[in-house]
Image (cartoon, grey):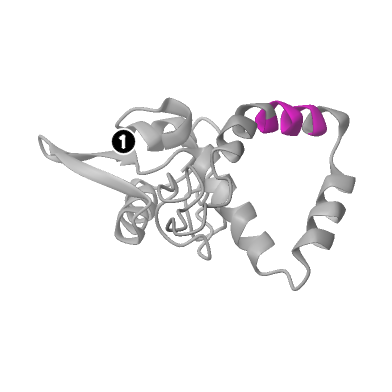
Amino acid sequence: MTRVWQWNRPVTVREVLEDLQQERSIAYTTVMTVMDNLHQKGWVRREVDGRAYRYTAVSTRAAYSAALMNEAWSRSDNPAAALVAFFGMMSAEQREALQDAMRIVQPNLSATSEPQSGEPAGEPVGAASDEATGEAAEDPADGAGPEAGR
């Protein structure tokens, strides 16, 4: 999956194979099986191109990472404590990235103020559309997923 995300364009099994072979010996059928598994799990879509398929990522790496973080946080029995612990683990660079992200999100948060009496409650801005489709429970970056064969 790393190759598909890095290249950010439709790729063939042959292209992924040739790139992986620069690092280690790997069989065409292994890469083909992994790409087919990713397709079956919904991580990539594929289109016929001659006698081969071209595979494209369904979501971005950032959206996938966000879905993993959201899933882990939502499973906590104490979400506030989990966030405090998570923030405590961050490097200075990560905290700066978080502050940058909050500056981007902050205007949207004010648009989700409490509804006036008699108004229906709406979803927070951005909550209805999630770029990361599929279940985050199956990690495409584990040995059985997109990173396999890397």
Would you say residue 28 sits in the magenta stretch?
no
Residue 131 image point, x, y percent: 42, 44
**Location of residue 135 with respect to 122 vertically, above or below:** below
Residue 10 image point, x, y percent: 29, 31
User: Magenta stretch mostly in which secondary structure?
Assistant: helix
Magenta region? 95-102
Q: Which residue is situated farthest in the front direction here?
A: 117
At 17% from the left edge and 41% from the top edge, which residue is drawn?
A: 47
Would you say residue 100 sits in the magenta stretch?
yes
- For this view, does 126 lie left or right of residue 65? left
At 89% from the left edge and 47% from the top edge, which residue is drawn?
A: 88
User: 61 and 33: which one is in front?
Assistant: 61
User: 45 and 101: which one is in front?
Assistant: 101
**Location of residue 137 with respect to 127 vertically, above or below:** below
Which residue is under mark 1? 14
- For this view, does 118 lie left or right of residue 69? left
User: 73 and 103: which one is in front?
Assistant: 103
Q: Amino acid at mark 1?
A: Arg
**Location of residue 51 with respect to 104 vertically, above or below:** below
- Quadrant of the snapshot with the C terminus: top right
Kindly state the secondary structure of the residue where label 1 is placed.
helix
Residue 106 image point, x, y percent: 64, 33
User: 90 and 74: which one is in front?
Assistant: 74
Q: Which residue is situated farthest in the bottom direction here?
A: 77
> Badge 1: how crowded within 10 Å, few (<14), some, or many (20+)?
some
Total tally of numbered discs in the picture: 1
At 44% from the left edge and 55% from the top edge, which residue is drawn?
A: 119
Residue 71 image point, x, y percent: 60, 61
